[in-house]
Image (cartoon, rainbow, N blue to C red):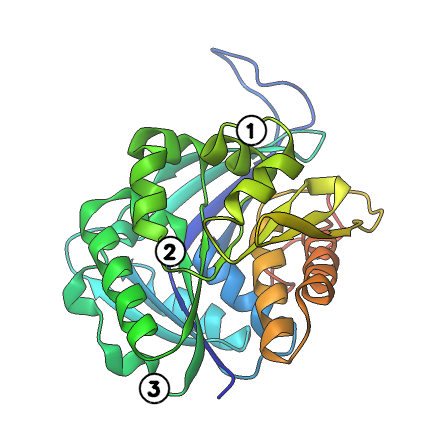
Amino acid sequence: MTGLLVVGDVVTDVVARHRTPLAPATDTAAAIRTLPGGAGANAACWAARSGCEDVRLLGRVGTEAADWHTRALHRAGVRPLLVRDPEAATATVISLVDASAERTFLTDSGAALRLSPADWSDELLRGVAHLHLSGYLFFAAPSRETALRALRGAREAGVAVSVDPASTGFLKELGVDLFLAAAQGAEVLFPNADEARLLTGRTDPVAAAERLSRMFPLVAVTLGARGALVAEDGSVTGRVAAAGVRPVDSTGAGDAFAGAFLAARLAGADPVTAAEAGCRAGAEAVTGVGGRPESGAWPPRGVWP
């Protein structure tokens, strides 16, 4: 079995890239695009882009955008298992991207965090070798219970599980201890450096990675332009450099890393080699707009007025 099941968020991204600082109480010129996104959906698309031939995505969307997201996932090579919510709209994120390519999110979780235990069945694990959970699911009670059921079902079926912590802002609101308790049982954790610091209280990413790898067997900490760290059993076992690229939009870089990492692992790669694949995907991701591989995004990667 080589199937990858991602359970997570499907989001409509409104990306606004502004060259000058935001001007309060008046206008700031920006180039604005509406694109399919979501940490879980992005990771699934990058896994498919990286060679995983069987990628499935379970998520909840509003009826107004369900067809659009379904088509986008199909184009990316992902099998969508989307639950249509008759009451809530699809999650929407306004991504403000400054001249340095750093992004700030305004998030309306909409239907994404209404993924309920009734939407889950252990039958979804049939043919699946790995389950990946978007950390956003842990930030609301219904979707957190769904994630916990999926994690339990995977462990009972002998399916490996990975978790992406997703957001320092939401982690702080939820509480570090609650998140770590909920994620226990996962074999792989994908924090970025800020998330690793928050989860451990360690300011040094190396120390944070080592501490997390005493809680989770394999930890890959992304460091942005400085690459990534791999830690296992309390020690850093690999350091991977990032490719030098001109960043346009950092949205989705961590999702790209996770998707490519998992695709490589499912193909038999060791953790450091998988992290190298993740860094290559992350470097590609930041050279274009939005969090997905090319897949019809506008403007094309590397082209922005």
N-terminal label among 3 and 2: 2
Q: Which mark is residue 202?
A: 1
Q: Is residue 303 left or right of residue 251?
A: right
**Which residue is the site of mark 3?**
126
Q: Residue at x 76, y 41 (%)?
A: 226
Q: Residues within 10 Å of mark 3 (few under 14, many from 20)?
A: few
Cα–Cα span, label 3 and label 1: 39 Å
Q: Are marks 1 and 2 in contact (CB under 8 Å)?
A: no
Report x, y in % for residue 110. 27, 47
- Work out whether residue 224 can be spotted: yes
The vertical placement of 131 against 39, above or below, is below
Cα–Cα span, label 1 and label 2: 29 Å
Q: Nearer the viewer, residue 276 or 302?
A: 276
Report x, y in % for residue 253. 62, 50
Q: Is residue 185 left or right of residue 214?
A: left
Q: Nearer the viewer, residue 203 or 78?
A: 203
Q: Quadrant of residue 249?
A: top right
Q: Residues within 10 Å of mark 2 (few under 14, many from 20)?
A: many
Q: Secondary structure at mark 2?
A: loop
Cα–Cα span, label 3 and label 2: 21 Å
The vertical placement of 16 against 301, above or below, is above
Which mark is nearer the camera, 3 or 2? 3
Three-letter amino acid code at disc 2? Asp
Q: Residue furthest right?
A: 244
Report x, y in % for residue 163. 44, 56
Three-letter amino acid code at disc 1? Arg
Q: Are marks 3 and 1 in contact (CB under 8 Å)?
A: no
Q: Nearer the viewer, residue 116 or 110?
A: 116
**Which residue is the site of mark 2?**
9
N-terminal label among 1 and 2: 2
Q: Secondary structure at mark 1?
A: loop
Which mark is nearer the camera, 3 or 1? 1
